[in-house]
Image (tube, grey):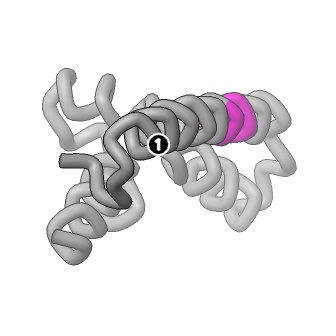
Amino acid sequence: MSNVASSVLLLLTGANVPRETLPGWMQAFGDVLPLTHAAEAARQLSAGGGLDRGRLGAELATGIGYAVLAVVLLALFERGSRRRATLDVM
């Protein structure tokens, strides 16, 4: 499962395939994934274009969103685990 998720992440973020060649729905989905904006900023920086604070800010916002989602899901799973006196989700 990890290999599939990693491959999908690399595809949709444009790390391996230029995002311009992807269909529109894949580009839209890639915009909310981590690594997308950082990869673009790194490409631009290595090409001599300078540091793009907008892309880095978008990556930071994406990371904060995922961190908040992780904390909320952890609290939810912990509450359910305590209620059922189990360590697993099911």
Q: Residue at x 37, y 60 (%)?
A: 87
Q: Image point 21% across, 33% down: which residue?
A: 26
Q: Is residue 1 above or below residue 38?
A: below
Query: How far across and how far down the image is residue 4, in percent?
Result: 16, 68
Which of 73/83 is in front?
Answer: 83
Question: Could you tell me residue 34's position as x and y percent?
Answer: 52, 47
**Is residue 17 among the parts visible in the rendering?**
no
Disc 1 residue type (three-letter): Arg
Give left or right: position of 4 versus 18: left
Provide the secondary structure element on which disc 1 rests: helix
Residue 52: image location, x then y, percent: 80, 39
- The quadrant holding residue 72 is top right
Q: Quadrant of the N terminus?
A: bottom left
Q: What residue is at 67 percent from the left and 60 percent from the top? A: 42
Mark 1: few, some, or many residues within 10 Å (few <14, many ≥20)? few
Q: Which residues are magenta?
A: 59-64
Residue located 32% across and 41% down the image: 84
Position in image of residue 22 (x %, y %): 19, 39
Q: Quadrant of residue 3?
A: bottom left
User: Magenta: predominant secondary structure element?
Assistant: helix
Is 61 above or below relative to 41?
A: above
Q: Nearer the viewer, residue 37 or 51?
A: 37
Would you say residue 48 is visible in this rendering? yes
Location of mark 1 (residue): 82
